[in-house]
Amino acid sequence: MTDIQSYPSFDSVQAEPFEALVAAYFQANGFITSSNKWFWSKDNRKRQRGYRDVDVLAISGSETRIVSVVVNLDDKIRHNRSRLLQHDMLAELETYFRLVEKFLRETPDYSWIVDRHHRSVLRVLAYKNGQLRPDVEDALEKSHIEPLPGRTVIQVLKEKVSEYGVRGIKSNNPTVKLVELMAEHSEKEGRVREKRGHNTN
């Protein structure tokens, strides 16, 4: 077997709910997404081989987003006990994106997705929990990795879902349905608080 899989792969079921939210976030922003594509790879630099997966791949017009999704930011990049940034974790994250791009580039049916001559290809780290400290943000920027916090994902999704509701756009996506319920609940709580405020005045 070569050092990287070079043929198309199937999407897999999203086992992590936050991945579904991230995919819906990009869909709400005009992207078509693919999730959990497994591919075989061998990293000659570290003499490691095995299967990896593309958490979320988002495509729109001339833009491509390769998204690594994690619940806790510390699982991808953090400080050691001496409060120094663990650059080995950052290197591993860079390796992940490099191998994903290589898989897409060397698969003929996918190569156009990462054609940097005609497309904007960005790397995104979506995280649900964690504090993005300045040195971590700087390190990600230098590695051309864009952070996407969970609060942004949820907030934008709620706004988009509310907008779609006003326009009469429906969806059977279970993740979107959950966000609809969250948005409706927030609106009801807001009206109750507003009513209580008027009553106290």
Image (cartoon, rainbow, N blue to C red):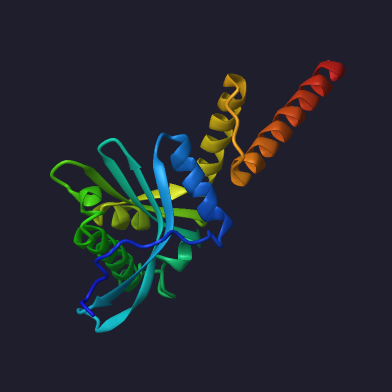
Name the one closer to the observer, 79 or 127. Answer: 127
Q: Residue at x 86, y 17 (%)?
A: 199
Q: Residue 167: x and y, percent?
A: 57, 20
**Quadrant placement of the C terminus:** top right
Q: Which residue is drawn at 25% across and 37% down?
A: 62
Q: Is residue 132 visible?
A: no
Q: Residue 8: x and y, percent?
A: 31, 61
Write down the quadrant of residue 194 in the picture: top right
**Quadrant placement of the N terminus:** bottom left
Question: In the figure, is residue 60 to the left or right of 11?
Answer: left
Furthest-left residue in view?
117
Q: Residue at x 58, y 32 (%)?
A: 161
- With respect to residue 112, does 39 lie above or below? below
Q: Residue 104: x and y, percent?
A: 26, 58
Q: Is residue 100 visible?
A: yes
Furthest-bottom residue in view?
47
Name the one closer to the observer, 155 or 35. Answer: 35
